[in-house]
Image (cartoon, grey):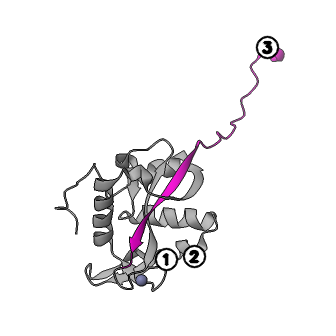
Amino acid sequence: MIGDREPARCPTPTPAVMTRVAVRGLDHTCWKCHQPTMCVVAVHTDASQKSEDWVWFEDKHALAFARELLLNTGQTRLAETIKRRFSHTARGAYLSNGCGHCDTIQGDWPLGRAISDYGLAAPLSELPILALGVVAEATWSHLFAGQTTRRHGYPMSWDNVD
Ligand SMILES: [Zn+2]
């Protein structure tokens, strides 16, 4: 009998598993104009409270991801400080933080050092949260798996940093 048969299962799209992410900043002093300026330094999920589980700004996908989250939360001015700038040290252009006052590049190397110094004095969990957003878990996993830079506690070795 037809009635005894299991109804055909329509493939229903699985709703994407979502995860909450945070963008962290660092109160920085511009090396050029010496004014305080906020730099965008890391992204992480609610579940990852240790710095090992964060993805840092040297990873350009992470910095672009953070820029998008800032735009999504209406922080256009801060988001626009993140752009490609020429670095004499790197002898090329890369996606970088810039001063909110004079637009000068805040280079990856000195910024990395500033975070290291910060980490020695205070828990990284005290870095200010600049934006919160909700993204697909898969988006985060992809970003995390593809990261090129990790910070495994402090102080870290700088041997492999350009
Ligand atoms: Zn400046």
Q: Which residue is mark 2?
A: 77
Question: What is the spatial separation of the Cα atoms under label 3 and label 2, in whole angstroms?
Answer: 63 Å
CB of mark 1 within 8 Å of CB of mark 2? yes
Q: Residues within 10 Å of mark 1 (few under 14, many from 20)?
A: many
Disc 3 marks a residue whose amino acid type is Asp
Q: Quadrant of residue 48?
A: top left
Q: Position of residue 134 (x, y in %)?
A: 60, 51
Position of residue 37 relative to residue 44, above or below, is below
| Residue for point 43% across, 57% down | 127
Disc on res. 81? 1
Disc on res. 4? 3
Residue lying at the far left of the rendered structure: 159
Q: Position of residue 100 (x, y in %)?
A: 49, 79
Determine if the magenta segment contains residue 18: yes
Q: Residues within 10 Å of mark 2 (few under 14, many from 20)?
A: few
Residue mark closest to the camera, 3 vs 2: 2
In the shown orientation, is residue 66 left or right of residue 124?
A: right
Tell me where the magenta segment starts and ends, as one range.
1-30
Q: Quadrant of residue 3?
A: top right
Question: What is the spatial separation of the Cα atoms under label 1 and label 2, in whole angstroms?
Answer: 7 Å
Q: Nearer the viewer, residue 120 or 138?
A: 120
Nearest to N terminus: mark 3 or mark 1:
3
| Residue for point 40% across, 66% down | 60
Q: Nearer the viewer, residue 104 or 26?
A: 26
Nearest to N terminus: mark 3 or mark 2:
3
- What element does badge 1 sit on? loop
